[in-house]
Image (spheres, rainbow, N blue to C red):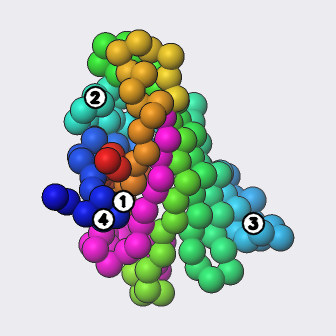
Amino acid sequence: MQDWTIPRTRPLAVLTVDLGPAQAHGATPRGNRKIVPVTGGRVAGRISGKVLPFGGDWALTRADGVLELDVRLTVETDDGALIHVTYDGMRHGSDEDLAALARGEDVPPERLYFRILPRFETSAPDWLWLNRVLCVGLGERLKTGPRYHLHEIL
């Protein structure tokens, strides 16, 4: 019998998000704020479809260099359902790797701590099960935006 106290997961999907130019708000009392538009993307796996434009990431870089994510977007599934997706998360790494990312260079994903906690909201009958799912996502940074490997927590 498996120990129920050890988390188990199951692959859900790969979410790739395309981003537009950031609105740099500068140093605020909470950190360096930027708002980044979500311009599109794709999701493939047990959920398949496209990321619709008109989402965003209300990102904050803290004084300790950690990037906090606060993302809202909409997925339109291949069967036409709309799924509202929100996720919080964080990304951090060595000063050298973060500087390379800032210059637009590739950094191997295993050298970054890049994790998200997505939640789903929908009224589409075939997708109601997503309203009751908790997930974790492991991220990597591509030139056009992030790609997340989403896993349902069982």
Mark 2 vs mark 1, CA separation in Å: 18 Å
Kind of residue sitting beneath label 2: Ser
Say which element carries label 3. strand
41 vs 121, left or right, is left
Q: In the rendered structure, which disc, 2 or 4, sits on the residue that comes first in sequence?
A: 4
Nearest the viewer among 117 and 100 is: 117
Where is mark 2, residue-wise? 48
Mark 2 vs mark 4, CA separation in Å: 29 Å
Where is mark 4, residue-wise? 6
Say which element carries label 4. loop
Q: In the rendered structure, which disc, 1 or 4, sits on the residue that comes first in sequence?
A: 4
Residue 84 tag number: none
39 vs 34, left or right, is left
Nearest the viewer among 22 and 31 is: 31
Where is mark 1, residue-wise? 139
- Residue at 44% x, 14% y: name it: 124
Q: Sort mark 1 into few (<14), some (14-19) or many (20+) by Cα contacts within 10 Å.
A: many
| Image quadrant assignment for residue 8 | bottom left
Mark 3 vs mark 1, CA separation in Å: 25 Å
| Residue 12 visible, this angle | yes
Q: Which quadrant is the N terminus positioned in?
A: bottom left
- Discs 3, 1 touching: Cβ within 8 Å: no
Mark 1 vs mark 4, CA separation in Å: 22 Å
Q: In the rendered structure, which disc, 3 or 4, sits on the residue that comes first in sequence?
A: 4
